[in-house]
Image (cartoon, rainbow, N blue to C red):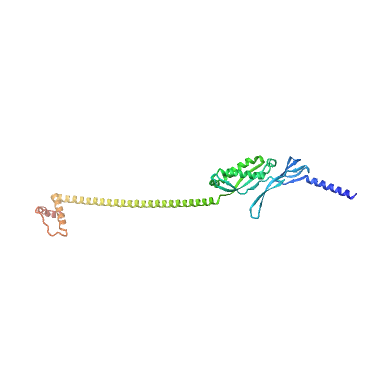
Amino acid sequence: MEISTIILVAAVIILAIAIVWAGIKVVPQSETRVIERLGRFHSVLPPGLNFIIPFIDKPKTIFQRTVTTNAAGRHIARNTSTTVIDLREQVYDFPSQQVITRDNVTTEINALLYFQITDPKKAVYEIDNLPNAIEKLTQTSLRNVIGELELDETLTSRDTINSKLQVILDDATNKWGVKVNRVELQDITPPESVRMAMEKQMQAERNRRAEILNAEGEKQSLILRSEGEKTSKINQAEATKQAEILRAEGAAQAIILNAQAEADAILRVAQAVATSNTDPATYMLAMKYIDTLRDMTTGPDTKTVYVPYEATAVLSSLGSLKSLFAK
């Protein structure tokens, strides 16, 4: 066999092996490829070992989004071409963009988009550049949603904004064979002047709350102090009342006892007078007269006492009193 024949056979064998190898496509799990035959859609390759016709069947080239970091630490997104379609959930980190709120405040916002390709055929043929289309759609939808809210609502309503964006993007990308699972706002950065004004407002609000708390504390303190003074005065008045009542009851008891004693004395005297045949009126008059004379003669300036003549009749009854007390 000539050398040229051997070389020709070897070349044919190598060419056959190359053709067979070109017709074998191994697709990893969670990936796929869209195959075109003579420029028309033919099939979507499932994961595993697949066979195609070389030079007739070709994978469709699509765009994918890749993010790199430059020397300054900033993320740079680039669109590159590939034949691999990733069926896993993907995350697009969009750069910050300026949006205007309803109260005309320019704010920088960057968002994260979580999506998944559910129909590779639609993702290839229904849109030219899927990553670029999703990015632009997210930016315009974000501007529309933020434009309906004021700055304060934007800062406090992230969940509402995320839900609205997710519904809008999922509805718009449905015809592209894409499912938007969720949207997250990373950073909302208002201008420096607005941030300073907000900080001053927050400080003023904190001061106002502190003043209110101090005023409430003083109010409660005054109320408690006044209630304490009120209770103290009530207790003092109650004690005074009880003391007066007790003093009055004691005086009443003393008067009653004195009256009872005097009544007993009068009763005893009356009984004694009745047994001695002495006039009770004369006795009582004599006793009162004696008390009056004692009061008249006990004063510090008293020197001379004049007894009226009519008093001799009263004094004459003293003899009978002597005999009465003797009994």
In this orientation, does residue 193 appear?
Answer: yes
Residue at 29% in and 51% down: 244
Residue 104 placement, left or right of 228: right
Q: Position of residue 290 (x, y in %)?
A: 15, 55
Quarter where residue 322 is shown: bottom left
Judging depth in this view, the residue of 257 and 61 nearest the camera is: 61
Q: Quadrant of the C terminus?
A: bottom left
Q: Position of residue 6 (x, y in %)?
A: 87, 49
Q: Residue furthest right?
A: 1
Judging depth in this view, the residue of 215 and 259 nearest the camera is: 215
Q: Position of residue 310 (x, y in %)?
A: 9, 52
Number of on-image labels: 0
Judging depth in this view, the residue of 306 and 211 nearest the camera is: 211
Residue at 80% in and 47% down: 18
Q: Position of residue 159 (x, y in %)?
A: 57, 45
Residue 38 placement, left or right of 79: right
Quarter where residue 175 is shown: top right
In this orientation, does residue 327 appear?
Answer: no
Residue at 24% in and 51% down: 255
